[in-house]
Structures are given as C-alpha cells and as structure tokens.
Image (cartoon, rainbow, N blue to C red):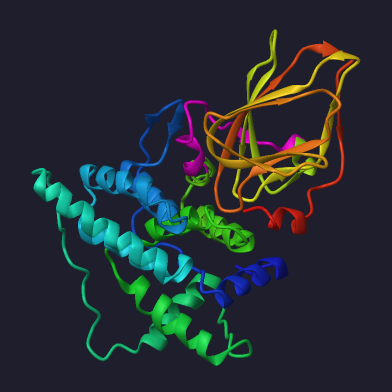
Amino acid sequence: MKKSPKTIVILTALLALGTTEVIAQSSVQTPTTQQQGAATMTLSQKQYSLAQIGAFTANGDIRRLNLAIDQALDNGLTVNEIQAAMVQLYAYAGFPRSLNALSALSERLKVRQAQGLKSEQGRAARPLPKNTDLLARGEQTQTELIGQAINLSALSPDIDRYLKTHLFGDIFANDLLNWQEREIVTIAALSHMQGVENQLRAHIDIGKKNGITDEQIKEIVQLSKQEMSQFPAGEENTAYAKYFVGKSYLNMLSAEQVPIGNVTFEPGTRNNWHIHHAGKGGGQILMVTAGRGYYQEWGKPAQELKAGDVVHIPAGTKHWHGAAPTEWFQHLAIEVPGENTRNEWLEPVSDADYGKLK
C-alpha cells in the first residue's frame, strides 16, 4: 500500500527515535467486556494488564505498577511475559524506567512467594537460529512494517544499525509477546509520556491496522486517569482546549442547582489566566481530589495544591490553575451562583513563569 508523504514523515520520525513497532502476523486477542469502576472495558484481561505495565513503567509510577504486577500474575500472565514487556520499554522510556520496573517485579515476586501466592514463570522465548544475521532480520521486519525500505544512515549510521539489529532484529524476535501485544504496551507507554505526540499518533495508526480498536485505544490512553479518584475523568476537554496549554479532560458531574465539573489535567497542563465575572455573587471553588498542581492569583506567588485542598476564588480575580510538570492533577470546579456571570479568558501562563515553579 502506498504511504502518504505525511505518514512517511511520521514513521520516519519514529524510526529516528527508536519507537517503531511491527504489524502483527500472530493471532489477535478476542476482546472481553468487564467493569473497571464506571468504565466499560473491551480489552482482554491480559491486554489490560500489559497496558498498565506499559503506562506505569513509562511514567515511573511504581506504586500502581506493583498493583498492576499482582493483577497481571493473578490474571494468568507469566513472569517471563511481564519481563518481556518491561525489557521492551527500555527502548521507549529508557534504561532507568525499565530497570526500576524489573526491580519492582523482582520484589513483588519475593513478597508473593512469602505470602504463598502463585507466580507462573512460564516458558522461555524460543531462541533465534544460530548465526542469525540480526541486521538482515531487522531490516526485513522494518520493511514489512513501513511498506518500503528505510535507511536512516543520513541521520546517524549508528542509530540505523541499532534500530535494525536490536529493536527489530532482536526484541521483536522474542516471541513471548505477539506484535499486537507489543503495540498495546508501546501505545500505553507513549500515551503517558510527554513530548512524543508524533510517535504516539503513528503507533496508534499501526495498532489499528493490527486489529486494536478505537475503543481499546481510548481505554489505553486513559489508564492513568481512571483511578485518580472516585470521579470519572470524562472526555477530552476539546471545547475549551484553546484556553489550555496541554491536554485536559472534563466530566460535568452536575448541571443543576450548582454546576460541578471534574477537571483532569495531564502533567504540565494548565489553563490560561482568566477571570470569573459576576454582577453579584459568583466566583468559583476548587476542591482537589487527586494529584499535584498549582493555583495562582495575579501578582501573588503560586500555591501548591494536593488532594484535600480547597481554593475559594472570588469573582473578578485574575488567576490560573493546573498540573505540576510531571504529575497528573484533578479537581472539582464548583461554580458559585451569581448574577450576570461570565468567564473572561486571557493570555496563557508563559513557559518561563511556569518553569520557575518547583
């Protein structure tokens, strides 16, 4: 199939950063439906566990990774399969995250053994034939993925060789996970990292060609939000996206009597400076439910916010609020009743000012 110029650019960028995968030739998982809080899941239990491992390894959330490891083992994943996912992630999230995840797995296995819980080791990966030419094997895999031969030697001969011999010729030759499962791990990891939007879009495209549905992708990218608090995160806040730096999600919990919205901020996301105007009364109350963020009024220092904090914002006060640079943030936004209320959206919070926050 002939690729569009835009697709080739994105996929080439992926290759340059070592973040491409392969379209699966192995069997596709049959989705099952189960409940996770208020969300309907279409990922199988194995797929969901792999997505959790990908997400929490990539963002360094060891607490939730430990829970995901236990759930994965209880759901029938083997130790070797989990290790294969974590090893793969070194190519996307780096050695430190991968090593931390493998260390967490090792510690969980010791705890489970002491508790008498079963952890199936599983089979080992089938070894490659002796004298396998990893460069040729990787180049073939890469070509099957892209639909044409790719040579990145102009960027760096070393990175071209590393990608072909190791990422494609070695990691994806490990048959403990099929290529669809590896795409789920990768999409989950990239969706929980910053600055990798092009790679994420390309992997979503590859995943969909490999049988991953839009609903499954939606579940994967929302993994970090679903468990932040008892309030569902809701859909992406596209209606107000132009007033935000970064991505946010909005779930209107109440539109009667007192409007209440649950607002979820991805790491580094904040809204613009703005003012809640009212002829009488008005203003807003923020009740922080999860994560870490900031609130700042014009001319005053920013204050750090954590779960349990409450902020009273009088009408007519210029202010902004949002997430910390490396953490998700969630709060309830409660509109105080008033007369002739309206919002005035102003300039974004500059990167320079935001970067000064601890």
Residue pictured at 16% horizontal, 58% vertical:
122
Q: Nearer the viewer, residue 302 or 12?
A: 302
Relative side of 335 to 290, left or right: right
Does 243 sit above or below residue 57?
A: above
Q: Residue furthest front?
A: 300
Residue lying at 47% horizontally and 42% vertically, measured from the top left: 223
Front-lying residue, 144 or 132: 132
Determine if the magenta segment contains residue 76. Answer: no
Instruction: State whether residue 189 appears in this view.
Output: yes
Q: Quadrant of residue 101?
A: bottom left
Where does the image place residue 117, in percent across and percent down from the top left? 12, 44
Asked if the stretch drawn in magenta spans residue 235, the answer is yes
Residue 107 position (above or below residue 162): above
Residue 259 quadrant? top right
Q: Quadrant of the C terminus?
A: bottom right
Q: Total number of numbered labels? A: 0
- Which is nearer the eye, 228 or 205? 228
Magenta-colored span: 222-239
Q: Position of residue 243 (x, y in %)?
A: 79, 41
Which quadrant, please, contains the N terminus? bottom right
Residue 210 appears anywhere in the view: no
225 or 27: nearer the viewer: 225
